[in-house]
Amino acid sequence: MEEVARARLPYGIGMKTIEPPEAFAPPAEQPHVLLSNKRRWIVTAGVMLGMFLAALEATVVGTAMPTVIASLGGLDRYSWVFSAYLLTATVTVPVWGRLSDLFGRRPLYLVGVAFFLLGSALSGASQTITQLIIFRAVQGLGAGALIPLSMTINADIFTVSERARMQGLFSGVWGIASILGPLAGGFITDHFSWRWVFYINIPFGLAAAAVVGIALVEPKRTERPVIDYAGALWLTLSITLLLVALVESGDPAVWTSPMMIAPLVGFLVFAVLFAWAERRAPEPI
């Protein structure tokens, strides 16, 4: 008790320094998924490659589109080649995130790569502009998994103190992909074919899937997943209609037309249904 009393005195007045017992020391910080350092960086390389491809596809088509239109026609639907990809990628982000919480990061990441590569292959084989728009939407479904799950896997395998540095690396990869996209699109179109703007994803996407599939080992999940189907449906429909309205809003002539009003009304209706469903769901999305 005397030593404790002395420990409370100002420093230097005949007191002893009392070191805290090791039992009270804070525990060492641990990531959610324990991997060796080598395996962590292998997984990081794989998910970075996947995110690079998804980010690249948002801009690589821009410089190829004049050639695409000359080949397939459909100048009046030009913007939908971009919008279909971005729309489905944006809408499905929360759904992919929730499903990965239920079923694991690795299987959902591999499913996302499969959608992305399927959409890439079909986009490259398109014979009409309508086919290209539909297949770009399929490609966007995969991108909606690759981009957020790359960040989530990174958060799982690194500690909180390490994540800031990794976030900077991922942001750098995204920026480089956005800058290289138009340059790569022009080069590939001039020297090969516009179809290779999409086909080029296949070997690199397969490599990313192989790396993540082999190197990422997650703990087994014992709980039974509960999927919020209603919430996922209302959320997807509401965001889709909102994005459709925003795409159409580029022309002031349609601001008061049914093409603009109907999606906005639908967005409000489905947003209310989504909020209602989430208040009652046992495991909200």
Image (cartoon, grey):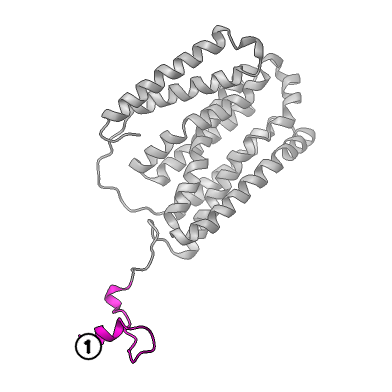
Can you tell which quarter of the image residue 180 is in?
top right
Q: Position of residue 24 (x, y in %)?
A: 28, 73
Along the viewing direction, whichever of 272 and 7 lies nearer the viewer: 7
Along the viewing direction, whichever of 107 and 31 lies nearer the viewer: 31
In the image: residue 167, left or right of residue 71: left
260 lies above or below 123: above
Circle count: 1
Dominant secondary structure of the residues highlighted in magenta in the image: loop
The quadrant of the image that shows the N terminus is bottom left
The answer to whether residue 11 is magenta is yes
Label 1 environment density (alpha carbons within 10 Å; few <14, some 14–19, many ≥20): few
The quadrant of the image that shows the C terminus is top left
Identify the residue shown where x is 62% and y is 49%. 173
Q: Position of residue 166 (x, y in %)?
A: 54, 56
Span colored in magenta: 1-25
- Give the residue number, with chain letter if any, for mark 1: 2
Identify the residue shown where x is 72% and y is 26%. 65
283 lies above or below 221: above
Can you tell which quarter of the image residue 20 is in?
bottom left
In the image: residue 222, left or right of residue 66: left
* Amino acid type, callout 1: Glu
Identify the residue shown where x is 53% and y is 36%. 143
In the image: residue 7, left or right of residue 57: left
Q: Is residue 126 visible?
A: no
Q: Residue furthest top?
A: 257
Q: Position of residue 37 (x, y in %)?
A: 47, 65
The answer to whether residue 85 is magenta is no
36 lies above or below 6: above
Q: Residue furthest right?
A: 190
Does dot 1 land on a helix, a strand or a loop?
helix
Along the viewing direction, whichever of 208 and 35 lies nearer the viewer: 35
Along the viewing direction, whichever of 16 and 276 lies nearer the viewer: 16
